[in-house]
Amino acid sequence: MAKKELPSKYDHLAVEKDRYQFWVDGTFFTPEDNPEKEPFSIVIPPPNVTGRLHLGHAWDTTMQDTVSRMKRMQGYDVLWLPGMDHAGIATQAVVERKLREQNISKYDLGREKFVDEVWKWKDEYANTIRDQWAKLGLSLDYTRERFTLDDGLSNAVQEVFIKLYEKGLIYRGEYIINWDPKTKTALSDIEVIYEEVNGKFYHMRYPIKDSDETIEIATTRPETMLGDTAVAVHPKDERYQHLIGKKVVLPIVGREIDIVADDYVDMEFGSGAVKITPAHDPNDFEIGNRHNLERVLVMHENGTMNENAGKYEGLDRFDCRKQIVADLQEAGILFEIEDHVHQVGHSERSGAVVEPYLSTQWFVNMQPLADAAVELQETDKKVNFVPSRFEGTYLHWMENIRDWCISRQLWWGHRIPAWYHNETGEIYVGKEAPADIENWTQDEDVLDTWFSSALWPFSTMGWPDVDEADFKRYFPTDALVTGYDIIFFWVARMIFQSVEFTDEAPFKDVLIHGLIRDAEGRKMSKSLGNGVDPMEVIEKYGADALRYFLLTGSTPGQDLRFHWERVESTWNFANKIWNASRFALMNMEDLKAEDIDLTKELALPDKWILTRLNETIEHVTANTDKYEFGEAGRALYNFIWDDFCDWYIEMAKLSLYGEDEERKQTTRSVLAHVLDQTLRMLHPYMPFITEEIWQQLPQEGESISVASWPIVNESFNFTAEVKQMETIMAMIRSVRNIRAEVDTPMSRKVNMLIQAHSAEIAEELQKERQYIERFCNTEELTIDTNIDAPKQAMSAVVTGAEIFLPLEGLIDFEKELARLAKELEKWEKEVALVERKLSNEGFVAKAPEQLVEKEREKLIDYKEKYASVQARIAELEAQQ
RNA sequence: GACUCCGUAGCUCAGCUGGGAGAGCGCUACCUUGACAGGGUAGAGGUCGUUGGUUCGAGCCCAAUCGGAGUCACCA
């Protein structure tokens, strides 16, 4: 790639343009299937084809990309498999809405044509999603992209359904399910969201047959009384002993129903008597079974009253409620209406109030599957949850699991592979239709979307063909990344299906993250209109800035607030990297990869920055491995901004602007090396800018995305030099401090004297005097072990030395004395603190040796500093 | 009702297996130093919600308590 001059301002749009295509064309993201390499795999949580990606997707996928990119650079054969989810209810609903706008209902089209329409929609949005993935820079292998409704996955779904059916783990039955009257489909328990609603509590008196007595009951849903088939009381309730076995005449309806005794009834609550509606309440259904009660369904599938509702037939359930309340009040049956706050279930997708509804559906018998999944966690094949607390969440759910209703009354999805014999009612389950198809009718329903998502980690790899190369090589996957809101929906189900069908956990690690919130901490939602489009962020600040913000903005498992200011400051970081690189490139002349030579004599700052680089490599690698992206990102930030830019580059200028050609060449080598290594570490976090700069560096790789990950170079650990460097840095800071104090700008040259505490220290400082001269901007610099401290001077202490700045005429003695007094106080406190620690027998005896030794060293240093400051004060006072 | 998370600088958040509190933004003063003024230098600002306990040592562990958020399960 041709070298070009970098503009002085980081232009994220220019940097990111066309870069993704370069990666895809280079097939860097397609694994090599190289047997020499260890495989590493992740499957993407397939986004719904209902629409555009939001910030949550950006967050989730960026984490996966960061891990994938690092592993790829570390030499793993990385497969990150992309794909999308058909999202049954959600997608069907949006397409239906779109058709409705054209005054077309799905029934007008018929099943086949309607499904064709949905496929068209899917193709359109799949392209949008791929464009968004590209903008985010995700290193996905598109040659393996899958869709939950493609042939292979559909085959896996049928296979699983049939196997479970044959094992008796899938059954068809009549139960109370959660019915969504708006979308007219059944829902599983977790698709129901309970929300607090200000409702009413209606108190009624049902007349006892052949008696003047009444029995008091209460309900929140009076319209269901039309389906009452009993009244229940507690068997031990003395108030009602005489009524058990008697009959009640159901008002309006006139049906005679039994008064039954059942333990379920709470004597303390309400009147202690409960109306029983087996067809419209799950608890009542159970009681109905125990007492052999009739089940009377009083509603249609769309939530209007049916023929069993008599004169209320055709009314919507809520209109019926109003009407029935009025009628019962008039009849004197209903005698009190109380305000009542209670939880009401709503459909997760349509928002409609869920109707408990008697219906025949397909279910998965969960207990055996859940047991196996729970047992897995006690073996070494367990799934490692990050953070670990989510394992508790997961296990708690698994241990209290209820059967899973998997049939959905939709057209968009995997049609249930079951046929019913037209005459005998016999059920046939299989991939192919029965031979005498004319005598059979296939089940109209489709499976819950999550039924296919649950198979995703292995169905995408070619299962049920267990000899498929991808399945053998890349399953089980290494990591799964998702939000805590879908642990039950997806993570749990993938685990038990995987255990059942592959005898393995589907992934080794599962990284759980939180939710993205707006700046005020509110959930981002369409209704609030507070959502932020990731593409808008990318347009304004670039994908790298967005990614870095997302990765470093929170800690695993925690929610993340979106702040534009933080994205902006991340852009500033990118701009800093840009300009530091620009400086380096401008000063590298025509340095080539083979010219980089770190074997020549290194200067102090070279040794220091190389040591710091080693520390950074260790820290970033370890923390990225642990999914601690925030920690790793901060280490990179500090290294780049503080160490590399603020100190190393500034010191390197001495060499670069100097005369010594060999020294210059070494500095160039260090600059090139450190920048190269730093960009590599930063690449998984900010792929675009790192690639752009790296292409300009003296190196011979094709792409940084496949360059090797930095490793610690033991020969670059210069402990003694780091200490020296730190002394000089402390000195420079002190001088800057003093100059700020006496208002002497750094641009003015001043004289400076350094009193070293030993000949060795003096010699060391002497060797590095150029840095002191430059950064303290000295006229005359004297370094000695025996300095005659100037009378009129500002002073400071550092470890191993004292410094004096003779600033005649500028010194305010009172202020200086006050400043020194303050400093003396500081060291006095420090000394006292360390002394107290060291005189604590418990500490000396029990604390780690190293720590105690460190404290002893500190004590010597602090005492020395204290003495120096004290002496200086004495001198000043003597002068006055 | 059970459980989980959060409470640290004005704001948003870090703080890894307990060993002298950090960042970004904001604020103050100064600086047109040849990569960057979206920059640099120096600085102000914290009883780490509260109370006990364990420990030589607690922001971190334990208990209780207050405040905020959430998950699950719920009585008609």
Image (tube, coloured by chain):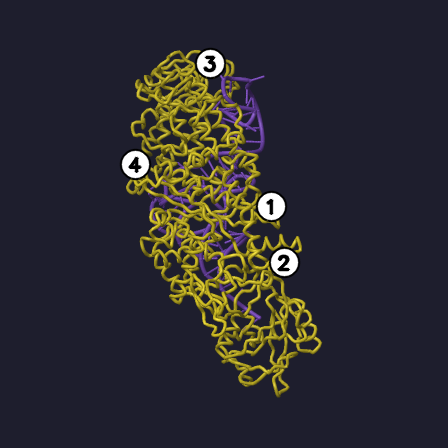
Chain colours: A yellow, B purple
**Label 1 chain ID:** A
Q: Position of residue A445 (x, y in %)?
A: 51, 63
Residue underneath mark 2: A105
Q: Residue furthest bottom?
A: A210
Give the SS element for disc 4: helix
**Between A44 and A579, the one nearer to me in the picture:** A44
Residue underneath mark 1: A530
CA gap, disc 4 and disc 2: 77 Å
The amino acid pointed to by label 2 is: Ser
CA gap, disc 3 and disc 1: 57 Å
Q: Are marks 4 and 3 in contact (CB under 8 Å)?
A: no
Q: Are marks 2 and 1 on the same chain?
A: yes
Q: Position of residue A708 (x, y in %)?
A: 36, 33
Residue A108, quarter of picture = bottom right
Q: Are marks 1 and 4 on the same chain?
A: yes
How many tags in the picture?
Answer: 4
